[in-house]
Image (cartoon, rainbow, N blue to C red):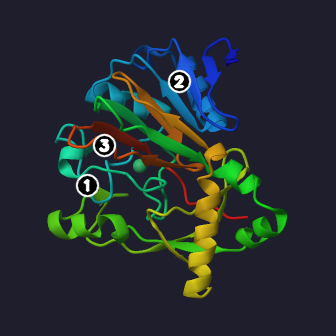
Amino acid sequence: MTLLASTDTLVVERLGAFHGARIHGLDLAQATDEQIAAVRAALVEHKVLFFGGQDLDPDSQVRLGNRVGELTPSHPVIKGVDEAHPEIYALDAADNGFADIWHTDVTFVRRPPLGSILRAVSIPPVGGDTQWADAEAAYASLSEPVRRLADQLTAVHDGTREFGYYLAQRGGNSWEGEDVARLEPVEHPVVRVHPETGRRSLFVNPGFTSHISGVSDAESRHLLDLFYAHITKPEHIVRHRWSEGDVAMWDNRATLHYANRDYGDFRRIMHRITLRGDEPVGV
Ligand SMILES: [Fe+2]
C-alpha cells in the first residue's frame, strides 16, 4: 500500500513510518510560490523529501534554495564549487568527498543549517545510496527515564574531527561573514526542541560530537554509544537509491544522514546547498 496524500498543491507519498516522502509531479525550477510554501511545510512534516526527474543546474539549484530559505556559504571550511556559486558544496568522490559516517550537517558551529538541498550530479552505476535517520522518532522511542537523563545533557561538537586536516592543508572558507581559520568547538543541548514544531530530537552525531559535557570520558562514550545505536535502528531510517535528476531536501534539525561508500572506483558527485538555521535550544 502506498500512502498518497494529495493537497491542492502537492502530491505526497510517504516512504516511512515516521519520516521520508516523495513529492510527485513537481518541477522545482518552475514551482509557484504556493508550491514552494507547501514544500517548506512538507519539509518540516516529513523531514526528508525526494523529488525525481528534476533538471536543475548550479544556477537553478541556488535560485531554488533562495526561495525555500536563506542560503549559507558552501561550508565553513570548503569553498564553493566555483567563483560563480559560492553557495554550492561539491561532494566529489574523486576529491575525497565522502560522507560515510552518520552526521547532521555542520553541527560544529553555533547556528547549524536549518536544512540541506542535495542534487545528484553524477551517480555510480551501483551503490552510493544515502540513508536518513529520524532523530525525533529516536528520542520518542527511548524509555522515559533515559529521555529525562538526555534532556539534561549538553554535548561538545568539534569540526576538526572531520575537517581539521582539510583546513590545515587548504585553508578555510568564510561562515557567518567571518573567515574560518580555526574550528572552535561549540556546545549544544543533547535534546533539541524543534523551533517550528516543538518536537524533541536527539541532537548528537558521530561525525561531529566529541563528548558529553560534565561527565567522565567513560560515561560520555557509553551514553553516546547508547544514543547512536538507538538513532540508527532500522526502523528510524529511510534509504534512497539515487537516479539522475533526483533532488533530496532534509530538515537538518531533526535528522542525521549517511552516504554509503560502496561503489569502488566509480565517481559520485553531489552538489549540496544549505539553508541558514538558528541556535539549537534545549528542553
Ligand atoms: Fe551531510
> As shown in the figure, which amino acid type bears the numbered disc 3?
Glu
Q: Is residue 40 above or below residue 278?
A: above
Q: Give residue 221's quadrant in the image.
A: bottom right
- Furthest-right residue in this view: 144
> As shown in the figure, which amino acid type bears the numbered disc 2?
Ile
Q: Residues within 10 Å of mark 3 (few under 14, many from 20)?
A: many
In the displayed structure, does residue 20 sit left or right of residue 107? right
Q: Which residue has dot 2 on it?
A: 36
Q: In which quadrant of the rendered image does the C terminus lie?
A: bottom right
Q: Which residue has dot 1 on it?
A: 78
| C-alpha span from label 2 to label 3 | 20 Å
Callouts 2 and 1 close, C-beta under 8 Å: no
* Count of picture labels: 3
Q: Which of 72 and 261 is in front in this view?
A: 261
Q: Position of residue 59 (x, y in %)?
A: 27, 27
Q: Residue at x 24, y 69 (%)?
A: 165
| C-alpha span from label 1 to label 3 | 10 Å
Q: Which residue has dot 3 on it?
A: 87
